Amino acid sequence: SQKIEQNSEALNIQEGKTATLTCNYTNYSPAYLQWYRQDPGRGPVFLLLIRENEKEKRKERLKVTFDTTLKQSLFHITASQPADSATYLCALAKGADTGRRALTFGSGTRLQVQP
Amino acid sequence: GAVVSQHPSWVICKSGTSVKIECRSLDFQATTMFWYRQFPKQSLMLMATSNEGSKATYEQGVEKDKFLINHASLTLSTLTVTSAHPEDSSFYICSARDFQTQYFGPGTRLLVL
């Protein structure tokens, strides 16, 4: 069966350090993978999308890698700040993007950045 | 980025009543919208795909007669929880696609007493 696993349920780091979150998947051949941020009681907010032919993508302090051989994506937040504390979700669309595919989400990693 | 709104943001109702939740794409048109449900400390679970002008597609285990979905226009989808029971209490979130990206509404917290 298809699975998306985010290995750490929670991650605590010191302010200024780099946070690295992991997303592994099985029995998927995704055209792209997405990362979202979710704050308590709020809907997810889109952060980054990385396509299967892209190894790495950056946006300000965020960096995402995508290894389709390992079936893994890593999400990095550099120079982390307490405001980065939230739950981060990785998500995949099944198969090729037809414009109608829903996303399947991992269980999320709750990041806590200590001042 | 694109904006999706939901209304109401929270609702408390008595068991047996029906509750309607609206989802609107504010600055783009969406032929497809999605409804998710999220229980505390769990991830989002897809309930159904709402298609403009046609019937919704429900995920396995989701009762279509209990969760009525109407996608009347390219910017509005509604989810009606019929004869709500306490076990339906959850956080309901809709999303709409703008190209490859899904944008989510702020969610609706439903509490059934």
Image (spheres, rainbow, N blue to C red):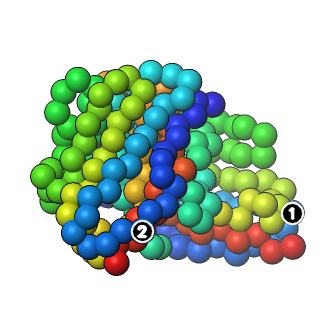
Q: Secondary structure at mark 1?
A: loop
Give the residue type that dot 2 points to: Ile
Contact, mark 2 vs mark 1 (Cβ under 8 Å): no
Residue located 84% across and 67% down the image: A15
Q: Chain of mark 1?
A: A
Packing grade of label 2 (10 A; few <14, some 14-19, many >=20) is few
Is B61 left, or right, of B87 in this rendering?
A: left
Q: Is residue A96 left or right of residue B102?
A: left
Horizontal and vertical percent position of residue B98 = 48, 26
The residue lying toward the viewer, choosing from B18 and B43, is B18
Cα distance, mark 2 to mark 1? 42 Å
Callout 1, which amino acid?
Answer: Gly
Question: Pointer 2: what residue?
Answer: B12
The residue pinned by badge 1 equals A16
Residue A32 at x, y percent in the picture: 45, 35
State the image coordinates of residue A98 (x, y, percent, origin top left).
31, 24
Q: Which residue is more in the foreground, B56 or B12?
A: B12
Please tell me which residue lies in front, A37 or A69: A37
- Residue found at x 15% / y 50%: B64
